[in-house]
Amino acid sequence: MTLNITLEQPDKRLALFGSADRHLRMIRDTFGVQLVSRDDELRLSGEREQVSKAAAVLDQMQRKLRRQEWLSVEDVGDAISKARADLRQKAQGEVEVYAKGHAVSPKTEGQKQYLDAIFNHDLTFCTGPAGTGKTYLAVAAAAALLKRGQAKRIVLARPAVEAGERLGFLPGDLQAKVNPYLRPLFDALHDMMDFEQVKRFMVNDVIEVVPLAFMRGRTLNDSVIILDEAQNTTPSQMLMFLTRLGHESKMIVTGDTTQIDLPDGQPSGLVDAMNKLKGIKGIGKVELQRSDIVRHRLVQNIVDAYERRKD
């Protein structure tokens, strides 16, 4: 595996690398990886698990350099120890991104299974009622993979299907019309990154938030691709989306099969795909339940009430 890490502060390259690259040699000798500096990037290569560990150490070191001008050998040793501890914690489900000052972590057993599926499969389907964290945890996992350098970009997509309203009556140009449909994805992003960082990533195409229709004809490599509200896709749209998966990429498909807004008689691409792809290895499938709802306590009661009165 090869991974490129961008130096946060290129002017502190000597402090990060150490005198005569001493710090880099410590990381190389500890994890058995190769490190090569090119411009404002550091390229790591080796076994996937060892590269991930070395990347976590460098992340800790760069964090320290935000607060101080130099790193000692002890600082590097501490970073190695802390990165190992953090990776053990991650194995228990914690995601390496923060929202409102707290690490994002699964709050239910179902959510833990969901994150495990994302990190261990190239394609993951997740269904469940509103409030179970389907979108939020997918975005958190994508941000963690981007931060660790295991993905170069995040692509977030949603079908622009009306839930009783009419898209054509919304004011503005096409982008203005589809923005309301993409708003939940922006909300999750802004919870985990500051506004300027999201803006910078979007300008540089590191993060892309698009209507599903804009995905046609593309192949996405080294990316985390999330399809939200997938219950509102048609089977042909779902096939189009799934075939965008490129090399070294992960795809996460989320939806609530109880809230399908397609015209009567139109089958849901999400339901269709989960049936057709049964038994294929390498695909994770997680079904979150009402017990996994983590929004306001009333949300679970509301979902329960509607479920009881379905007929």
Image: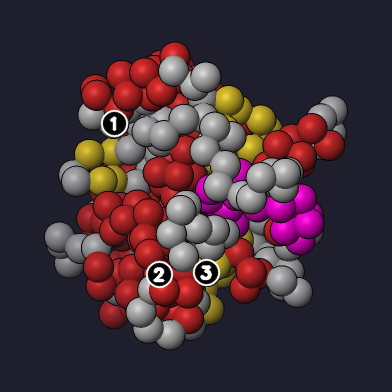
Q: Which amino acid does label 2 sit on?
A: Asn
CA separation in Å, label 1 and label 3:
26 Å
Magenta residue check for 227: yes
**Which residue range is magenta in the image?**
224-240
- Observer-nearest residue: 117 or 145? 117
Q: Is residue 41 left or right of residue 217?
A: left
Between tags 2 and 3, which lies in front? 2
For label 2, the residue is 179
185 lies above or below 211: above
Q: Is residue 90 left or right of residue 223?
A: left
Magenta residue check for 231: yes
Q: Which of marks 2 and 1 is nearer the N terminus?
A: 2
- Observer-nearest residue: 202 or 7? 202
- Observer-nearest residue: 268 or 225? 268
Question: Helix or strand or loop: what does disc 3 sit on?
Answer: strand
163 lies above or below 285: below
Q: Is residue 305 left or right of residue 49?
A: left
- Observer-nearest residue: 233 or 46? 233
Question: Helix or strand or loop: what does disc 2 sit on?
Answer: helix
Classed neighbour count for the residue bearing mark 1: other residues with Cα under 10 Å, few (<14), some (14–19), many (≥20)? few
**Among the 4 quarters of the image, the one containing residue 172:** bottom left
For label 1, the residue is 295
Q: In which quarter of the image is the N terminus?
A: bottom right
Q: Which amino acid does label 3 sit on?
A: Val
For label 3, the residue is 210
Q: Which residue is drawn at 44% across and 79% down?
A: 175
**Among the 4 quarters of the image, the one containing residue 212:** bottom right
